[in-house]
Each structure stands twice: as structure tokens, then as C-alpha cells.
Image: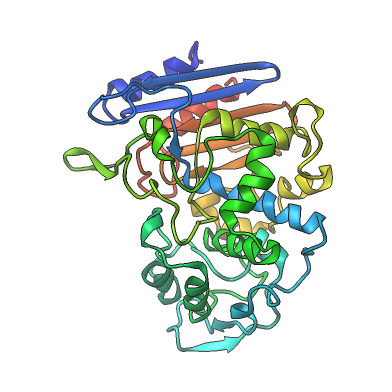
Amino acid sequence: MSSSLRDILEPYVDGGALPGAVGLVARGGRVEVEAVGSADREGTAPMVADSIFRIASLTKPVIAAAVMMLVEEGLLALDDEVAPWLPELASPVVVRTPASPVDDVLPAVRPITVFDLLSSRAGYGFPADFSLPAVGLLFSELLQGPPQPQHVVAPDVWMKKLSEIPLLYQPGEAWLYNTTSDIQGVLIARASGQSLPAFLAERIFEPLGMPDTGFSVPAADLGRFTGYYRTGDGGLELVDAREGQWSSVPAFPSGAGGLVSTAADWHAFARMLLAEGAVDGGRGRLLSAESVRLMTTNCLTPVQMAAGELFLEGQGWGFGGSVDVTPRDPWNVPGRYGWIGGTGTAAHIVPATGTVSLLLTQVQLGGPTPPDLMRAFWRYAAGA
């Protein structure tokens, strides 16, 4: 076992795989935070503990929590059909087989529900085979790939495009990745009567003290914003600069991957989950303990988990994040909840031990498989 978190992070920075990174591991009352390297490839600014990152799919648990807030208020129910708020999905059709052409369809056997969206089993999303015709439309029509916030159309137009794409599976039949979190974001806005950025700011970020979390970075804070890169043949290639796509609020605030945040901010969200919905300092609750339990409990069948192996690696799924059910590796503690982001981020909680682990980097993942750094980080966080 490495002696410190810095020992885990520094070799990847020193070796040139990453410009920098911020790691946080909290066990009980002890919080270890390390910032190593630089905020950009050129080394113009050091990485600091409150550097701002594009957190990509770490957005998903936040969105799921927001949906559960509306469920608790009675604006939504888990078994509600989504059609009253999302009329574009009132009469979905399904391809005859996953490999069928997109015009070979059948009517859905039942409506899509709120629970289908939360559990990622609405019929939209990514399976193991990205080459399927219906999946290709998610990329070409909806830009369901690496975050490109300024290139996505406004929610109403996006939903109209979505309604023209057939489901890959019947509602409730299969776990599919990503798209349902974007649909949840539209659902939150329509059911609450607020824009998604406004709802999250008022109802989650402000109560939890998450000042650096949102869908864009204010001009005054761009100095703390990190560059975003991918690994190319010649080394790290710039994908998005500080003054790039996150410097203004996008037309489509992505519930699947649009947020920026800091280690301290996401840690505040994690503490709320560990406290079963309570806000630090006895300042009320965002969620009930039952809602947090639902979010962090596996709702997939063994068959659905096996079909999602490419993404889930044998684990289950709650609302907005994976739930460990099989101890394949030292870090797979039953009940461990969280997820990874395609921009090089990872965040998990272990309710049984009160542990939080959070890794923020700015290099795009090469695919669904977590890189070596994440596995080394998880091993350290697990004390293995």
C-alpha cells in the first residue's frame, strides 16, 4: 500500500500522462486532499485544491437526487408515466431487435415511467455494441458522446429529435447508459417550472455550500479552471481551453455530464448522501433517508447487470450511479455507490464505513474501462 495519496498521483503527472490531478479521500473525520501538477499542459498555473474541473458523468448522481426531491414533494411519483411532462415520449416505438434498422419498429408494450428514467431502463442509451443503428442516432442527432455543451440544441428541440429515435429495448427491459440522465434534466425543468441550472443552484448547490458547481464557469473564476485534454499520438492534445465551451451557460444543460465542480463541492454532496439526506450542521434535509436508500440500492437484475458488463464491470446500478454488489476487486465493497466521468473523474461513497473517494483529472478517458490511475486510487481509498 502506498504511504500517501500524493504517492498515488505524482507518478502519473511526472510521467506525463496527466498535467495534474486533485484527489480526496475522507474516512470518518479525517480528510486527505492532494493537488499535484499543473492546471494546464503548459504549466502556467499550479493545480490547487479548489481547481475547477469538468466532472462529466459525476453530474448523474446530482441529477438523480434532484428528481428524488421532486418525488418527495409530490410533483412526481416513481411509477408515474413521464408523458404529462415529456409528451414527446407519450407513444414510443421500439426496434424489432436491437440490430434492426431504425424503421423496423413495434409499439412499446407500456409507457415510460419516472422509475425507468432513474434506473436507466427507459430503452434509450448505450449498450455494449455502439454500432447498432438506433444507437448511432444518439450520437449523430443528439451528440451523446464526450461533452460538447455549446454544440447541443435547446431542450425542446432535443426532445423532439429524441422522439424520432426508436427505443433499443422495451421500457424496463434493459440497462442502457447515459441518455436517461439527460432526459431527467429536462423532466426536472418541466416539472419544477424552473430551468435546470436555476433549480440545482437554489435547491442543491446553495444549501450544501457548493459555490463552484454549475454548468459554466464565471469569468472571475476562470483562473482556477483546468484545461481539458485527450491522449493523442503526439501526447496530450487540447480539447477545451479555460475560455472554451464552459465559459457560458449552454442552451442544453446536460444532466448526463454538463457540470463543473471542485473536490470540496462534490465532497459536500457526498456528505449529504452519507448523512442520509441531511445537510451539514443540522441545517435541515435535502432528501429523506428512504430516498437516499433508493438512490444507492441496486435495482438491476443479474441478467441486466451482465448485459451492462462493459460499463458496470459486474456491479449494479441505483439512481445516477453504480452500486457494488460483487467483490471482484479490493475496492468493490458491497453498497459502494458512485460513478466515473469521461473527462477523467471518479467519485464514490461507502455508506457502511463513511468513506468518500474523489479523483479529478482533466484527461479524457479512452473508453468505458477505468484507467490504471483510477484503479490505483480506489485501491488506496479502500486501504488495500
Q: Is residue 116 above or below residue 263?
A: below
Q: Furthest residue to the top? A: 3
- Residue 314, percent from left and from top: 58, 48
Q: Furthest residue to the front? A: 220
Quadrant occupied by the C terminus = top right
- Residue 6, percent from left and from top: 44, 16
Residue 71 position by quadrant: bottom right
- Residue 84, percent from left and from top: 71, 77
Q: Is residue 334 above or below residue 82?
A: above
Q: Is residue 227 left or right of residue 180?
A: left
In this picture the colour scheme is rainbow
- Count all numbered tags in the image, as a single digit: 0
- Residue 12, percent from left and from top: 34, 25
Q: Furthest residue to the left? A: 234
Residue at (45, 75) in percent of width and height:
134
Residue at (71, 70) in percent of width and height:
113
Asked whether the viewer can see residue 313, the reply is no
In front here: 65 or 191? 191
Q: Is residue 36 above or below residue 223?
A: above
In front here: 250 or 148? 250
Asked whether the viewer can see residue 21, the reply is yes
In front here: 91 or 348? 91
Residue at (67, 59) in percent of width and height:
118
In front here: 151 or 230? 151
